[in-house]
Image (cartoon, rainbow, N blue to C red):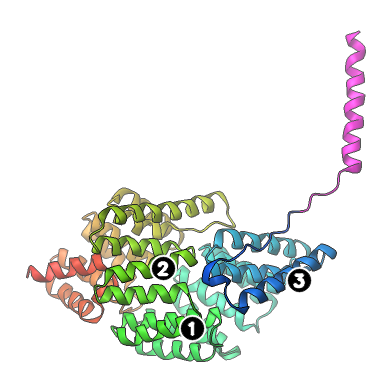
Amino acid sequence: MKKYLYPSLLVVFGLLAAAIFLFKKPITPQMPTLKERHGDLAAGGEWLNTKAAIKGLLAKLRSKPDDQKSRLLLAQAYMQEGRVTGDHPYYDGAAMQLLEEVLHAEPENFEALCCKASLCLTQHHFAQGLALAEQARQLNPNSGFVYGLLTDANVEMGHYDEAIKMADKMNAVRPDLPAYARVSYLREIHGNLPGAIEAMDFAVKAGYIGLEQTEWTRVALGHLYEVSGDTAHARGHYLMALAARPGYAYALAGLGRMAAVRKDYATAIRLYQQARITVQDYAFADELTDLYRLNGQPAEAKKMAAESIAMLASAAEDADNNEQMGHYADRELAYAYLKTNELNKALEHAKIEYERRPDNIDVNETMAWVLYKRGAFAEAQKYMQVARRTGSQHPVLLCRAGLILSKLGKKAEGQVLIEKSLKTAPYLNPEVEAEGKKLLAAR
């Protein structure tokens, strides 16, 4: 009887396979939806307008699934929502899904390529973002937006001369808020802080008061004043940003830093806690680690350091498992592990980031500082020389460079840098400030 069973089973399986082939419908990815905002982010007309716009786009796509224009607009809306809420893991993933669908249907869609490049830069996939921006430029060499992407990508990869060329082209095509902001950053990293402040002021004035992009830029202007040692102007810009956009997390964080300058750590902690409730940003947890320590709360500092590492490690793991998405966070992890005195892990992650972009000055500064903390002063100096190649006058960079030189026996040269740093803005990094003051006191 068994000899008849197998042919019968084969027939049955064949019929089942045919049925699956004939009647199975293609599975379309579930359309990503909008999350509710909470607290200050849910107040005001902006949230109502955002919800209405996204609801309309979702309705269009349900009725006409091949409407690629609406799909692209929805992706852009989700990218902006990620900026506003800080929920990049969800919204960047949602936007990337939509953009991949657009590009599958229209491989040479210029706007979709630009948006995908922008997402890659947000996720710190800088090499991929640069390649996509170059691809987009081939399609439309007259777009100011694409030159902004090329500026950012080249900066992050350490191609500073090329970044300047791209920023010049961007401003030639369309001088506006994003264009002025790029000029400001390039001036800053080349040591021209007054010029950076001037360009960022142009950027703020080119924006609409209250919009997230404008107030982000105003906060950036405030930070430039911080770096230059002008805390009064810095505080003024943070207050203006908060007045224009109530509850704005990055303005609250700026005011928190100003409270810390006055050694009012309790107020600084409260402001950072308020910022964290509004926006998910690991940087808030990282800075709270220092504030709790300065306020004599070691247990809270330890807890916050662990939370910061957990957030970063999760993002890094996602990035390792997904070539397109997931935030590369190894540079940030290196600094986070230094705060918990896990020097081997700090070096491991600093090296990973260095392998990705060995020409970037910030990455070289990270390598230098990790090696300094490990006592490898001569090796640290090799990376610090690269970190300083653009002539940046950032006080934290100068102090770190001075500490390394001092450890190598070049005390006079090192002390000049440390003194300049502490005279300008000693409050920018409590750990570096403490080490700088300790070394100067030992003269």
Q: Earlier in the sequence, mark 3 or mark 2?
A: 3
Number of numbered discs overlaid on the protein picture: 3
Question: Picture quarter containing residue 139?
Answer: bottom right
Between marks 3 and 2 in the image, the one whose residue lies nearer the viewer: 3
Residue 23 lies left or right of residue 85; in this view the side is right
Residue 26 x %, y %: 83, 49
Residue 138 lies left or right of residue 304; in this view the side is right
Residue 167 lies left or right of residue 360; in this view the side is right
- Determine whether the residue tagged by mark 3 lies in a helix, strand or loop: helix
Q: Calculate the distance from the C-alpha at mark 1 to the C-alpha at mark 3.
A: 32 Å
Q: Which residue is mark 1?
A: 181
Discs 3, 2 touching: Cβ within 8 Å: no
Q: Which residue is mark 3?
A: 56
Specify the segment rendered in magenta: 1-28
Q: Calculate the distance from the C-alpha at mark 3 to the C-alpha at mark 2.
A: 42 Å
Viewer-proximal residue among 115 and 258? 258
Q: Which residue is mark 2?
A: 360
